[in-house]
Image (spheres, grey):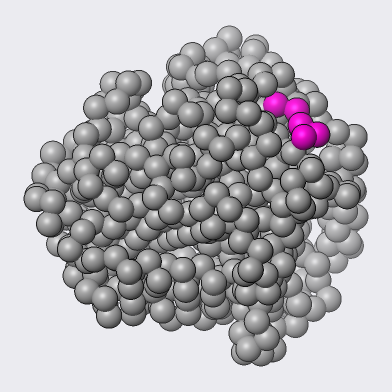
Amino acid sequence: MAVYTLTGFSLVSLLSFGYMSWDWMKAGSSGEGEAAVAGAADKPHIIFILADDQGYHDIGYHRSEIRTPVLDSLAAQGVKLENYYIQPICTPSRSQLITGRYQIHTGLQHSIIRPRQPNCLPLGQVTLPQKLQEVGYSTHMVGKWHLGFYKKDCLPTRRGFDTFFGTLTGSTDYYTYDNCDGPGVCGFDLHDGENVAWEHTGKYSTQLYAQKVIKILASHSPKEPLFIYLAFQAVHTPLQSPKKYIYQYRSLGNVARRKYAAMVTCMDEAIGNITAALKRYGYYQNTVLIYSTDNGAQPFSGGSNWPLRGRKGTYWEGGIRGIGFVHSPLIRKKGRVSRSLVHITDWYPTLVSLAGGNLTVTPPLDGYNIWPTISRGKKSPRKEILHNIDPLHSLAKSGSLEEGLGIWNTGVQAAIRTGDWKLMTGDPGYSDWIPPQTLPSLPGIWWNLERQRAGSHRTVWLFNITADPYERVEVSAEHPAVVRRLLTRLAHYERTSIPVRYPADDPRANPELHGGAWMPWASEDEEVDRTVRKKSKKRTCKICKLKSFFKKLNTRIMSNRI
């Protein structure tokens, strides 16, 4: 087999470097029956911190060059979740966190909610903060919403949060809070409750959000249960950071990696300030702090998912395996690593159970109560994860119902994990392994050995993720019975799905019509338009350019063959 070398590293050595039966009727149960925290006065304070676009490699305890002393310490004293799964892009992870349901059960299984789409998290879904409000919690959100805002009923303050401070769209400037959804369609996006917060222009969002959380802690009584959902904008693009954090990474030749690292470290410091405030104001001893990423990183924007395969927007492990840990004095067995299977939908039933809330809902949740797994090291009740089924994603041309054994059309983009096995169909996204980008002259190191070996027409992939976490060896031919079983599971899930909600852009959303800010524009009696949005030529052109870039980059690397 040919080996490619670059800057003195062999492909083999680079890939070697690193860290060495879902049940529809029972989802939402713990499987262990551990009692919730008893008594109103004993209800734990819950701090949920969600980082944006932080890669699997980009935390100190995953051997990163990025300094995260606060996160490392919190994780070391808590429980690290090393078999933890999220979704490959923003809106899906956030919707599953706040509803405890897979995307196929909320209609958000395709892409993200864009600023001009008359769409939002379905109003019939009872959210996590609403369940916590039912049992006496004060609920607050700070940061990025990205679950739709086309009418006021979609806003965080109408979906269970007593207060909200942050952005409604998916990405803004860290200082000016401007966001553009296409040429000439730009607006300001920072809100305090349901009002535009113009007065905070110029303040760096990571630090501003931490200050808002600390202000909430200072004004609330630690004797009353508190839930804070802190959804940092960091470390999503644009790559912006105060200069003092960039200086310590001046040795990194790659400019994007340098800025990205600075943003991670700034966020780490902000979390340290929040942790100190929890102790100062008397919350800490009765607090459960959860840290999670929302999806994999984009390597060409400074992030790294190394040594995992793939990146943000893909169903390879680099797109969906997240950083996660729980820190709390309430954990019985601390200072350990859990390799139990955990998914972002599990936080809803776990936290509602901890709060003493009622989990009797119809239809049942897709998440499980994993507190016994976290606190006592019990076996996880979760055996399976539906990563997604996206019927609107472009069908893989070579896929067919015949290739899917008459069970499943393998042209459909889908992914599922059952036990040790992971199956993907359709187009799972670019399948590359990219080391941290530290060298100034290389925009990326791109390998696609699987595609070279198997050809570009494959539409079924099977991996034993436990034995092969980096997805190097595709084994569908060796395990046809496993393929059949997982295709059957996909067909089962598809029968439980609801129609996709992905409407066309609404011109009434243009910020020019609303004083220059992104804000609700539709009347309260308007429903989501079920007409599926057509992909624009502009977006298709961007994708074509990206494919062309990768083709040229691959040619460049192939020229270094020895």
109 horizontally vs 8: left or right: left
Q: x, y (%) of residue 533? A: 75, 26
Taking 147 as reference, is 266 above or below it? below
Name the one closer to the observer, 303 or 526: 526
Q: Position of residue 254 (x, y in %)?
A: 75, 77
Q: Residue furthest top?
A: 406
The vertical placement of 131 against 79, above or below, is above
Q: Residue at x 47, y 73 (%)?
A: 211
Q: Is residue 541 above or below residue 525?
A: below
Q: Which residues are magenta?
A: 503-508
Q: Nearer the viewer, residue 315 or 536?
A: 536
The answer to whether residue 25 of the structure is visible from this angle is yes
For the C terminus, the quadrant is: bottom right
- The residue that appears at 76% across and 77% down in the rendered structure is 255
Q: Quadrant of residue 115?
A: top right
> Which residue is at the front of the view, 202 or 440?
202
Q: Nearer the viewer, residue 141 or 494?
A: 141
Q: Residue at x 66, y 19 (%)?
A: 530
Q: Is residue 33 left or right of residue 98?
A: left
Q: Would residue 9 be seen by someone viewing this image from the given angle? A: no
Seen at 77% across and 71% down, the residue is 6
